[in-house]
Image (cartoon, rainbow, N blue to C red):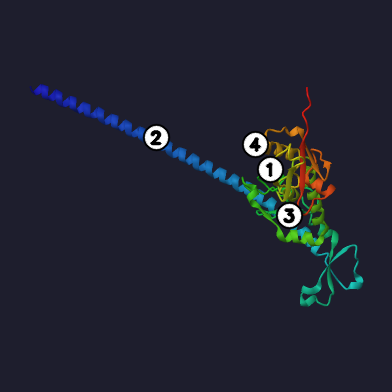
Amino acid sequence: MKSMDRKKKRNSRSEKHKEKEKNDEKEKEKDKEKEKDRERSRDKEKEKEKTKVNDDKKASSSSSKSDNSIKEEKKKTEKVLNTILLTSPEKTEQNNIINISSENIPKEINQYSSIQINKQGLLDLLKCPICKGYYRTPYTINECMHTFCKSCIFKYFGTSNQREQCPKCNTKIGGRPMDSLIFDNYLDSLLNILFPEFEEIDNKNNRLLYKTFRDAGKPLPGDEEEAKSSMPNIKIYIQPENSKENKYSGSFLVCKNFDISTLKKLISEKSKEEGAIESELIVVKFKDVELSNNYTMDVIDNKYGFDQDKTIFYYYVKKKEKE
């Protein structure tokens, strides 16, 4: 019995020893995993530091570029401002200078009658970097303060592969470049003062553009002339020339571009109650003159003159030809 007890004790000790060894191995494996995790985290930190250094280098290079371009603009502006001449009227050279009123000149220089700025130097500052022409409806990028024509910068942001940066200095603007644009009201006012003829030229071109599309039958949105002509404001009366044969009569409120072809269809539609009339057989007359299908109310008014009291159109129905 005693030998049996000893064996059991030995077996239990060996099992405990084995269990301990297993636990020790597990602890070692855990320590190894922890060490690997620490190495991974150290590697990640190193990668982050490298990325940060690279980003800082890029940012510093782009900012230095931006700073350089701003410095160049400053130098150019200073060069123009340094050409300001403070002179008396007898020294004025009208072809090379622009006169500025002396009303708000500071007291220390009020002995001069006017400020005269070098014309070409000033005009060079009013040119769009994209089209090289004078600004038309100037818009400025908020991040770098460079200015462009509205049509130029809108087209650039809409079509260019580099739309997320300024086309002049390459300053990064972001994924929504249109949000960075600001209308330059003061520069626009200055341009209108220096070039008052521009506004009239723009208006003339706009009128021509609207007319071209209007004449082609494809009016553009915002065409005021088309809106006026499409507004029903002319009252006309329709009466049959022979009341026995054509029973329908009535009045309509129509617009200036309402034509005779449409009027015939309307008469045909309205006469269904009295018996169908084919619009092709209807003849419309005004002041005893048969009217062509393409005549509009505006054309008829200009050609024959509408009656102020009551504008009456007469119609009759032609007999259908036998086949």
Whether residue 219 is visible = no
Q: Which residue is more in the foreground, 154 or 93?
A: 154
Q: Are marks 4 and 1 in contact (CB under 8 Å)?
A: no
Q: Nearer the viewer, mark 4 or mark 3?
A: 4
Q: Nearer the viewer, mark 4 or mark 1?
A: 4
Identify the image quadrant of residue 94: bottom right
Position in image of residue 227 (x %, y %) = 72, 49
For residue 9, above or below residue 87:
above
Q: Are marks 4 and 3 in contact (CB under 8 Å)?
A: no
Q: Is residue 23 left or right of residue 211?
A: left
* Upstream in sequence: badge 4 or badge 2: 2
Q: Which residue is mark 4?
A: 273
Q: Amino acid at mark 3?
A: Pro
- Mark 2 neighbour class, 10 Å CA radius: few under 14, some 14 to 19, many 20 or more: few
Residue 158, disc: 1
Q: What is the CA distance from the residue labelled 1 to the residue labelled 3? A: 17 Å
Q: Are marks 3 and 2 in contact (CB under 8 Å)?
A: no
Q: What is the CA distance from the residue labelled 2 to the residue labelled 1? A: 53 Å
Q: Amino acid at mark 1?
A: Gly
Q: Which residue is mark 3?
A: 138
Position in image of residue 63 (x %, y %) = 66, 51
Q: What is the CA distance from the residue labelled 4 to the residue labelled 1? A: 57 Å
Residue 33, disc: 2
